[in-house]
Each structure stands twice: as structure tokens, then as C-alpha cells.
Image: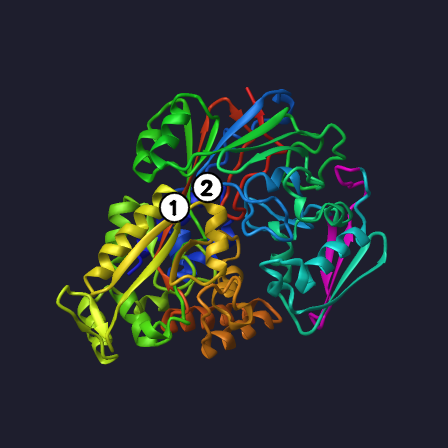
């Protein structure tokens, strides 16, 4: 079971570090069964630190110039908001969205200076800010935003998350500053959709002219930096946009053009190298060192380490079309899940810096339902009984057989050290059940091509600020074959998705979120594994750099080098 004391301690730490508002602290504590009065007592014993973090230095002290070198734990994807499979940190330098999350988890304006929802919940109106423009010089008005959203809704666009916009029936731009989303039904969650990188505003005119080449040599966004270079497997680089018209985001201290001359993100795929690179001063900031190195980095006086629980996790998908292996059978998926010792993974690979997952989302999310913990506990005897009920029996080599078929299959993972290690642990654990799992680690681009074809099984780490929204894509029958790569079709899950996507208010959304979590935990369209802590590291000469748990990457408007 998830240790509620551990979760509560992390929440209190996040509150003390100004990564969590008091309201969200109370909401998330309530989600794990801790009363408001208990939280208040703890806060009284340890009052919130009043000083701003050291990284939030005063604007007047900022210096212009220098290249920020940031280490990244993944390879880089094509930087096209409409058709990419993943968005990387450079998105937040190159693009902007209508809305943004503050460090307290509140929606704030970015390209939309205001917004409102009609009384019946079926119309959302945005007012586009004055003065914004694309890197190419084209003004950003309501029509430009409409073109982006219309493209996302177009089935031929290839947007992997277009289904999140399915409740939007039509989009109107009655004048240059007004954008209207007309809903088929109330869709309270739409505000959380448009703040994400897949709804970042791109110049559709430029994108259409370049076709498939867009995002490789040319990027036409509205962010404070312009594109220089993308070398898959190596780096992405950007430079300051001298004509940036400025930002209206309230929590940004720097409202003008960026301080940095540029940024270079480097892919460091071998986890053991990440800590060494920042200790040696080869990079200035880093996302996710190997977790076993976190304590050493925290003790280094030249470094600042920021840690918080991610609203994202690792999932194990089985292909329902492998009916010869009974992956379409609930008992088989439950057997695999019961054979996985999540606590052992937590100790061996995460060094206790994370949590086991028994349902589709993590304890860090405000909608987390602790009731999912009744499912998917490690129980190898129960797992063996379930496969026996399906008619599988161990052969001479210990591998299960049925109708002359061995229970052997392939698992594809990304060629990154933690993914490979986790794949190897899964291989060893399901072998005790009698399954012959072969792990194949492949580069990032090939991985996404491969899983779109429907492999036997896959390992995936989702990263999203509103996890239910993205998990829906992997498990709902409406998104078969992509990104429901396992071709999962479970009526109870689809019903819960409908409830979530038609929730008219916060209370209905919370109820639908619980329904969804329980349906996934019980029926296992994907198998939840673990969540790791999110660890960011900066050298002390980096200022204004503020990772927080409500946005998956930091923004770079305020960042400067001392």
C-alpha cells in the first residue's frame, strides 16, 4: 500500500518550498485521508518559509548573456505541437499556449489575457492578448489560434491527442481578439487541455507550407527563443528572439525578452553520466539524474536539488490482439499484474524515491483515489492460480503452455538506461510466473513507430500535468490503434471516460475521476507499475530557473547566468 505518511511529508515539503498552494495542500491531503484539521496542526508546528527561493532572484540583478546548458534524460522528438508523439523542454522556449500553470497550480494567462465559461458549460470564450506575434512576424490573433485548433480536430492532422478535443464541436473567431469553443456537451476539463504543449500555438501557414519538414529545420512559434538546431540523440539548441514582444504571465518576473543568449539541451541517455556531467560543470541544469546519485548531489554545496512527486508514471501494456496468449482475458492481465512486485522495483531501481502504482494515476494528483490500492497487489500464488484457470500449464522448461503454444512474447522499451533496467526486472518477475519475456530496447523514434504497429507488449512512461487526460488515450477504445497501442477495449473504462469528458463542474469531475481509476485498476487495459520522484538539479550560478510540479518543464523567460 502507498504510505500516507510519506505522501503527506512530500506534500508538506512542496508547500514549504512554494511548489504547492495551501488550497492544493488541503485538497491533496484530503485525497489520501488526512483531515484539514490535522494538516493545520502540522502547519502550525512548521510554518511556511516566507522568503522566496534563491533561484527567484530580483529582476534588477539579472545579467544578459550566456548559453544555458541543460541535461535531459530522454532523446528529443520532432518539435511540432500538432503531430509530435512527445513534447520536450524546448517547447517552453519556442512556443506558448493560451494558458499556463503557476507554481501554485492556478491557471494564468499566456496568449489569452482572459477567459470565461458560459452558465451551461457549453461555451468557452478566450480573449487573445494584444501584441503577440510569431517568429515569422505574423500577428497572433483569434483566427491564428482557430487555425491551430481546427487542425488538431482534423483527423488527417495526425494529432495523437486529438480525442481530448472531441467534445469541442466548433471553433469561432468572430473578431481578432475573441475565440469561442462551442461544446457538444459541458466539458469542464477543456481549460486543462489547452494549457498543454500539444495545444501550443504554431503558425499553421508556415506548417502547411513545409509539410512533413516542419519542426525539423524551421519552427514558427511565439516563445522567447527561436530555433537553431535539432540533432536526434544529441541536442536541441535555440537562441534569444530579439523581437519577442514580451510576456503577460503574472508569475514571470521578466516581462521582456529573455536574458539568455540561448539554450542547449543535451540528451544524456546513460543515467550514470548525468550526475557526473553537472558535478564537473559540463552542464548547468539537469532533469532526472540517476536516483542513486540524488543524495550525493544534494550534499554538493555547488548544487541545488529540487525534488517533487510526479503526476506521471510507468505502465506496462499488453496487446489485446494476442488472443493466442489470452491477453484479451482479464484473468491473464490480472495474473501478470499480481506477478509484479512493485515494492521490489521501488527498492532496486528507485532507491525508495517514488511509489508503487496500483491504479492509472499517481498519489501526487489531486484526483487520486486511494481505493485503487485494493487491486494489483503482489501475489504470485494468485497469479499462478489465474493462469491455471485459463488452461495454461508449465512445460518441461517451466514456461507456460496451452494448446501447444508457449507463453513467450516481446516487450519493446526505449533505449534509455532506466527503461532497460525496468524491462529487465519485469522480465525476471514474470518468468517466475512462467512467462518468457524478451526485452528489446530501441531508439526513441523507432520506439514510437514500433508501438503504433501494435507490438506484443510495451513499456511506457507518460508525462502529463493532468494524468487522467493522457491515460484516457492509452486505454479508451476510441483511440485504437494510436495511442491505444494495446488495442484495449473495456466497456467499464469507456463509460468512465465518457463521465469524465462530460463533467460540468469540479464535483462531477472528481467523481468521474474516481470511477475511471477504479475501472482501470480492476480491468487493466494497461498495467500500472511505479512512479518515480522528479529530480531537478541546478548549479548555483543559474538564477530564475523554477521547475514545479504543475508544469512538466521549467520556463526560461526569467533564467539568467551569474
Q: Nearer the viewer, residue 50 or 544?
A: 544
Q: How many marks?
A: 2
- In what quadrant of the picture does the N terminus appear? bottom left
Q: Could you tell me if residue 352 is visible in this image?
A: no
Tag 2 secondary structure: loop
Q: Which residue is mark 1?
A: 533
Q: Determine which quarter of the picture holds residue 254.
A: top right
Q: Which residues are magenta?
A: 112-136
Q: Is residue 525 left or right of residue 434?
A: right
Tell me, for residue 54, which label it has, or none: none
Q: Nearer the viewer, residue 303 or 491?
A: 491
Q: From what the image shows, is residue 429 above or below residue 246?
A: below
Residue 350 included in the magenta stretch of the image: no
Residue with the most extreme front position: 404
Residue 123 included in the magenta stretch of the image: yes
Q: Position of residue 410 (x, y in %)?
A: 34, 59
- In what quadrant of the picture does the C terminus appear? top right
Few, some or many residues within 10 Å of mark 2 (<14, 14–19, 20+)? many
Few, some or many residues within 10 Å of mark 1 (<14, 14–19, 20+)? many
Q: Which residue is mark 2?
A: 74
Q: From what the image shows, is residue 48 above or below residue 184?
A: above
Cα–Cα span, label 2 and label 1: 16 Å
Q: Position of residue 269 (x, y in %)?
A: 41, 37
First-in-chain label (2 vs 1): 2
Tag 1 secondary structure: strand
Q: Position of residue 458 (x, y in %)?
A: 39, 58
Q: Nearer the viewer, residue 422 or 450?
A: 450
Q: Could you tell me if residue 322 is visible in this image?
A: yes
Q: Nearer the viewer, residue 361 or 90?
A: 90
Amino acid at each position: 500500500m502507498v504510505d500516507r505518511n510519506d505522501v503527506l511529508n512530500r506534500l508538506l515539503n512542496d508547500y514549504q518550498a512554494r511548489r504547492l498552494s495551501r488550497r492544493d495542500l488541503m485538497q491533496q491531503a484530503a485525497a489520501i485521508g488526512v483531515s484539514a484539521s490535522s494538516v493545520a496542526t502540522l502547519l502550525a508546528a512548521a510554518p511556511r518559509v516566507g522568503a522566496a527561493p534563491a533561484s527567484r532572484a530580483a529582476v534588477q540583478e539579472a545579467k544578459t548573456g550566456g548559453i544555458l546548458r541543460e541535461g535531459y534524460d530522454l532523446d528529443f522528438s520532432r518539435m511540432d505541437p500538432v503531430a509530435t508523439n512527445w513534447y520536450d523542454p524546448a517547447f517552453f522556449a519556442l512556443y506558448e499556449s493560451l494558458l499556463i500553470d503557476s507554481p501554485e497550480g492556478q491557471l494564468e494567462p499566456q496568449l489569452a489575457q482572459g477567459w470565461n465559461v458560459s452558465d451551461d458549460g457549453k461555451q468557452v470564450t478566450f480573449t487573445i492578448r494584444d501584441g503577440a506575434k510569431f517568429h515569422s512576424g505574423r500577428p497572433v490573433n483569434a483566427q491564428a489560434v482557430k487555425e491551430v485548433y481546427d487542425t488538431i480536430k482534423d483527423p488527417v492532422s495526425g494529432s495523437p491527442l486529438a480525442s481530448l478535443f472531441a467534445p469541442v464541436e466548433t471553433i469561432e473567431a468572430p473578431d481578432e481578439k475573441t475565440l469561442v469553443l462551442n461544446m457538444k456537451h459541458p466539458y469542464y476539463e477543456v481549460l486543462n487541455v489547452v494549457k498543454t504543449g500539444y495545444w501550443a500555438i504554431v503558425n499553421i501557414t508556415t506548417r502547411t507550407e513545409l509539410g512533413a519538414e516542419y519542426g525539423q529545420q524551421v519552427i514558427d512559434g511565439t516563445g522567447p527563443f527561436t530555433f537553431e538546431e535539432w540533432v536526434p540523440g544529441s541536442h536541441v539548441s535555440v537562441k534569444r528572439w530579439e523581437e519577442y514582444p514580451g510576456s503577460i504571465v503574472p508569475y514571470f518576473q521578466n516581462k521582456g525578452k529573455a536574458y539568455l543568449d540561448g539554450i542547449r539541451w543535451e540528451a544524456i541517455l546513460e543515467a550514470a553520466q548525468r550526475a557526473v556531467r553537472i558535478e564537473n560543470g559540463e552542464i548547468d541544469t539537469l532533469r532526472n539524474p540517476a536516483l542513486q546519485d540524488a543524495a550525493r548531489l544534494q550534499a554538493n554545496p555547488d548544487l541545488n536539488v529540487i525534488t517533487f512527486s510526479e503526476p506521471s508514471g510507468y505502465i506496462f501494456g499488453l496487446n489485446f490482439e494476442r488472443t493466442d496468449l489470452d491477453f484479451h482475458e482479464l484473468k491473464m492481465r490480472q495474473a501478470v499484474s499480481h506477478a509484479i512486485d512493485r515494492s521490489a522495483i521501488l527498492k532496486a531501481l528507485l532507491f525508495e524515491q517514488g511509489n508503487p502504482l496500483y491504479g492509472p494515476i499517481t498519489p501526487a494528483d489531486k484526483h487520486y483515489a486511494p481505493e485503487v490500492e485494493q487491486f494489483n497487489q503482489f501475489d504470485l500464488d494468485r497469479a499462478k492460480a489465474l493462469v491455471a484457470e485459463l488452461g495454461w500449464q508449465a512445460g518441461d522448461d517451466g514456461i507456460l503452455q496451452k494448446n501447444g503454444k508457449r507463453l513467450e512474447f516481446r516487450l519493446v522499451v526505449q533505449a534509455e538506461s532506466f527503461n532497460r533496467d525496468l524491462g529487465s526486472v519485469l522480465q525476471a518477475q514474470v518468468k517466475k510466473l512462467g512467462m518468457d519475456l524478451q526485452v528489446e530496447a530501441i531508439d526513441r523514434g523507432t520506439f514510437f513507430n514500433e508501438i503504433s504497429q501494435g507490438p506484443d507488449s510495451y513499456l511506457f512512461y507518460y508525462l502529463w500535468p493532468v494524468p487522467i487526460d493522457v491515460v484516457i488515450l492509452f486505454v479508451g477504445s476510441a483511440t485504437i490503434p494510436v495511442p491505444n497501442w494495446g488495442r484495449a477495449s473495456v466497456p467499464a473504462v469507456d463509460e468512465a471516460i465518457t463521465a469524465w469528458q462530460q463533467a460540468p463542474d469540479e464535483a462531477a469531475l472528481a467523481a468521474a475521476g474516481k470511477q475511471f481509476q477504479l475501472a482501470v485498476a480492476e480491468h487493466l487495459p494497461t498495467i500500472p507499475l511505479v512512479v518515480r520522484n522528479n529530480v531537478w538539479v541546478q548549479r548555483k550560478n543559474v538564477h530564475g530557473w523554477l521547475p514545479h510540479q504543475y508544469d512538466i518543464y521549467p520556463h526560461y523567460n526569467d533564467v539568467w547566468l551569474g
